[in-house]
Image (tube, helix red, strand yellow):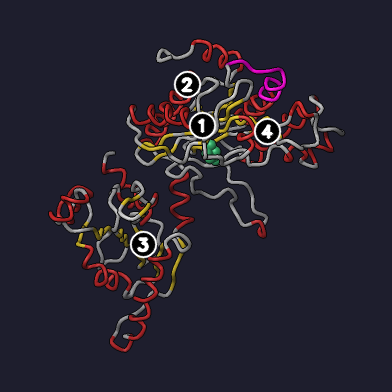
Amino acid sequence: MNNSVFVQRRAQLIATLQPDSVVLISAATEQSRSRDTGYPFRQHSDFWYYSGFNEPDALLILSNRANLPAAQLLCREKDPAQEVWHGRRLGPQAASEALQLQATALSEQSTILKQSLDGSSAVYLNLTEQTDLLAQITVQMQDLKQREKRGERAPLQLIDLAPLSGAQRLVKDDSEIAIMRQAGEISAQAHIRAMQYCRPGRFEYQLEAEILHHFALNGARYPAYNSIVGSGNNGCILHYTENSSLLAAGDLVLIDAGCELYGYAADISRTFPVSGKFSDEQAALYQLVLDAQYAACNAVKPGSDFAAVTAAAEHVLTEGLLGLGILQGELSQLIADKACKQYFIHGIGHWLGLDVHDVGAYKVNNASQNGSEQPFVPGMVLTIEPGLYIPAGSPTERRWWDLAVRIEDNLLLTADGHENLTTAVPKEIDAIEQLMATGNARD
Ligand code: GLY
Ligand code: MN
Ligand code: MN
């Protein structure tokens, strides 16, 4: 990514700070998986958003104070012995130039942190996520307070950075949109590949392997979240990631998977029949979720909001469930009672970006202040993902039991509506059946 976007984002954030403030953002740390093996490193999203630096053990300090640099980075020093074992480090000298900020060795952290805090009026940091950093700052503030007689001064305010970074990250810039388009396309093609590979007798994790393979072959080494491949009643478990069952003829399989590209997530769900042909019940339930998805997508345009989108989907789902005899009663009453929530047990969607469930407020104010919905504006990216889940034992005819359907796409708000970033993977019943019938050359 071009470094100028990170410089621009920092300037934009700094322009919103109270006078004489500092912002502190910690990099992620490496996580142990077992003894000497680690989980793949994933940078903290805010840290990445404002620095473009993908190493652990670093601290970004931004400031609007006259006596401090606008952007400082504390990072690991070059160390040939460490690097030959654990990988290359950029080091402060190269980082200064590459990232266009003032970089210093991490060993200076205590001194630089103290200089940054001393005399600042406010310190911004993510108060609920970066608790190690908060603890460090608290110790530094205690030290500063003890030295007030010598003219040092602890900051007067700690301010949560999350609302500010959340608001900035909510509306994507052109570089982010380009990446998210590409992440959507790669992920859509991966779903196509899984549909084509699907057969009774294969394992759920083998469909997952097809998806991950496609991600990596196309430049996205990691998934944005653990892929969900749930066949039969596994589909009723929303975050099913065991992916260990055999695919059985006659079952549906629900796949929820998306790649991560330069930190940005795609998040697609598709549901299709293991043997390539929907039964009557499966087709009826599937078509209903698809109709609800179209209704919800149609409501995604500037000025609309998640409440409007939810209402559109719930109207279609309730009417459809009533038509299928899965719900009984009077339509307007069922809508008022939100009766469809018995089977549509999650929200209609969420913001999407560096985090799958991305940051950004859903309400403009707190509910106690008559919080109103965050209105959609161009540049926002969100998912639309209605689903129906009818586990065994539900108060319906048995023929509906154990069916689970979710259809999820990623939508970019544009000036006159939206652009579907994940439209390449089919969702019409005919198109899915046709695609599965063409199979896979590697059979
Ligand atoms: N993949 C998680 C979600 O759809 O929200
Ligand atoms: Mn989602
Ligand atoms: Mn999903």
Is the residue under label 2 in contact with that under label 3 (CB below 8 Å)? Answer: no
Quadrant (top left, top right, bottom left, bottom right) of the N terminus: top left
Amino acid at dot 1: Ile
Q: Nearer the viewer, residue 343 or 181?
A: 343
Amino acid at dot 4: Leu
Q: Which mark is residue 388?
A: 4
Which residue is at a point 36% across and 76% down the rendered structure image?
Answer: 139
Residue 272: image location, x then y, percent = 58, 23
Sequence-wise, the earlier of marks 1 and 3 is 3
Q: CA distance from mark 1 to mark 3?
A: 35 Å
Q: Nearer the viewer, residue 116 or 214?
A: 214
Residue 439: image location, x then y, percent = 48, 13
Residue holding disc 2: 192
Instruction: Please identify the dominant SS of the magenta region.
Output: helix
Q: Does ligand 1 reach within 8 Å of label 3's beta carbon?
A: no
Q: Does ligand 3 reach within 8 Å of label 1's beta carbon?
A: yes
Q: CA distance from mark 2 to mark 1?
A: 11 Å
Residue 291 seen:
yes
Residue holding disc 1: 268
Residue holding disc 3: 23
Write the start and end of the magenta stretch as one range: 276-287
Amino acid at dot 3: Val
